[in-house]
Structure formats: C-alpha cells, structure tokens
Amino acid sequence: MIEIQIHPSDIRRRVRYFFFDRRRVLLGIGLLSFILIGLIGSMAAAPTVIRRVYKTNFLHNMRGERDIQKERLRENVVQMSSLERSLEEHRVRVEKLITVYGLERSLGQGGFSLPLHPKADVTEYQLDDARRREVSLKHAMRRLQDQLELLARYEAANQDLVRHTPSILPLPSDQFVLTSPFGNRISPFTRASDFHKGLDLSAPTGTPVYATADGVVNFAGRYPISQSVAWWRFGNVVVVNHSDRFITIYGHCDSVNVRAGQTVKQGEVIANVGSTGWSTNSHLHYEVRSDLEEPDKYIPIDPRIYILNYQWNNEAVLLMKARTSKDYKNFDPLPSAFVGKRRS
C-alpha cells in the first residue's frame, strides 16, 4: 500500500490522503510508460510522416503540372496541324503561280514536305515529336517566304506579262458547277472515249463570261461548218490571244459581247453562258492553250492550274500530273482564224 498526503499551505484546511494499492500503482506506471513510449514513437516517426506527406503533395502538384503541360502540348500540336494545312494550301498556290508564269520548277521545290497527321491522337505526341514538327514548320515557312518574295519580284519586273496570263475564273465563283474536267472522258454524244481539252462549267443561261486575262479577241461568233465541223460544234465561241503566249477559248455562248480585233481587259464581260452548238445543257466550255511547250503550236493545258481565285479539290494532285496534254497528240489544232496575226 502506498500512502500520499497533500498538505495545503493554509493550516486551517485539512490534509488530504490518497491510498494506492500495489495493483493501481503498477497500472499507473504502465499507463505512463505507454504514453511515454507513444510520444517517443511519434517523435521518431514524425520525419518519415512529414516526408511522406510532402512527397504525396509534391507528386500531386507534379501530376497537376504534367496535365497542364500535356494540355498545352495538345493545343500546340493542334495549332501546328492547322498551320501545316495552311502552309500546304499556300505551297500549292505558289506551285500554281510558278507553273502559270512558266518559271523553273526548281523554284517551287524543297522545304515544303510537312508531316501531316490529320487523324492521329494528339495526346499521344511526345515533346520530341512536337519539336521536330516545329523545326519542319519553321523551315517550310522560311522557304515559302523566299518563294513569295521571288514571285513578287518577278511580277514587279514583268507586269505586262502577268496581265496577259490567264489567272481567274471565267464565271462568277458561286454560279457554276464543274461537270466535265480536263482529260480523258466518255463523250456524251458518241459514248466513246475522247480527250476533253478544257473544262465544262455548268451555269444558268445568261451568266456573264469574263476574260481571264488582258488580250485581243481573235475570233467571236460561230465558226463556219464548211471549214471545221469540230469547231462549229462549239456554237458561239470567243477566242482571245494573250500576248502570243496563251489563247483562251469560251464555247457554247448564248451571246457574244465582243468582236474580232477588240482589246479586252481581265474581268471584262465578253459573252454570256448558253447552250449553242453541240451541248446537252447550258454551260461554258473553257480552254487554255499555250505555246510554251512547243512554239507556234498552242497545246491545251488544264485550265484549273490557271485559275488562282478558286480552290479546286485535290489541287496538289493536279500539280503532280502533267501540266499539258503533250502526251495526247490528236487534239484539234486551232483554225487560222483563231490564231490570226500575232499581236503584242
């Protein structure tokens, strides 16, 4: 038995006595020991717990930062994909200009091959992939800028030639449908394979027909059947000579607004769409012929390449194909009345 006495400082107050048997003393000592051990253990484990909490918070913050960077990378990849498509469109336009002006093909080569990935999941891209694409884009942009500067200098030095180069649609862009492109086709009249030397642009009767470049009218009207059945079939036709480099042909017109020998400007209305001659519907037959390949022999060229104010489907494919029908030797030559005396 253990006796504990508590004597107050005030002698008038009584003394307090506490008695503890052996079992209670041992229980108290055990409880205090357990508390002491717990405190010591907590103090020993505190650094580990703190490190674990810090690591958990750090990893959480790093995951958040990773997700933010991943989203930024995704946005940048989307922007690069959009820029790649835009650069490809401009590349095709530059290629068309180079072809239209008859410049060296080497001017349009190099630096435009871009790794387009329109169907890929952008979240799968790694940083190295994005960096490689960024380098490719910068190179392509520099190359494109160089080409545009070269073309600008060429146009400034050859303004007269540029004005006489066919480069626009012969019809309003919102009033036609391409029904027969340039190249091999099945003739709607003979049902046999033939070579279509121009474009058939379906449009309502009376739609204005524009001169696609500055030039001089060499022929306007209906060609005599006694001289050529093939050209008589084009009905009312207008033929414009562009500085002896190009000849444009506008067939099946309803009415003709110009006469032979008249000077016309690009965008001037020279006729109206019709269905004269051999025609299954109201449309314009439009041809571009050039003597760039063979002097004094005007060879048909795909007019779509010579239309810069309208975007056709698969223009890149058009540019990869032959620019002219030089492999097709049996096209109808132009009548002398269509060529006429050369004018400057």
Image (cartoon, rainbow, N blue to C red):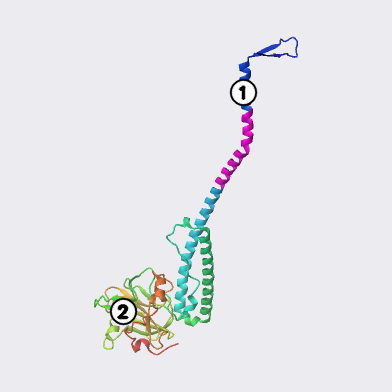
Query: How many numbered marks does the figure carry?
Result: 2
Q: Residues within 10 Å of mark 2 (few under 14, many from 20)?
A: some
Choose between 143 and 309: the one closer to the eye.
Answer: 143
| Segment colored magenta | 36-61
Farthest-out residue, left: 190
> What residue is at 53 percent from the left and 60 percent from the top?
128
CA gap between label 1 and label 2 equals: 109 Å
Location of residue 32 in the rendering, given as x and y in whole percent from the top left corner: 63, 24
* Tag shown at residue 337: none
Q: Quadrant of the C terminus?
A: bottom left
* Tag shown at residue 195: 2
Location of residue 25 in the rendering, given as x and y in whole percent from the top left corner: 63, 18
Of tags 1 and 2, which is closer to the observer? 1
Q: Quadrant of the N terminus?
A: top right
> Residue 50 colored magenta?
yes
For numbered disc 2, what is the local secondary structure?
strand
> What residue is at 29 percent from the left and 79 percent from the top?
194
> Residue 275 colored magenta?
no
For numbered disc 1, what is the local secondary structure?
helix
Type of amino acid at the residue the image marks with label 2: Phe
Quarter of the figure with residue 260: bottom left
Of the residues under marks 1 and 2, which one precedes in the sequence? 1
Q: Is residue 73 above or below residue 236?
A: above
> Which secondary structure is most common in the magenta stretch?
helix
Q: Which residue is mark 1?
A: 30
Quarter of the figure with residue 274: bottom left
> What residue is at 54 percent from the left and 48 percent from the top?
63
Left-right relation of 333 to 152: left
Choose between 119 and 39: the one closer to the eye.
Answer: 39
Location of residue 19 in the rendering, given as x and y in whole percent from the top left corner: 65, 13
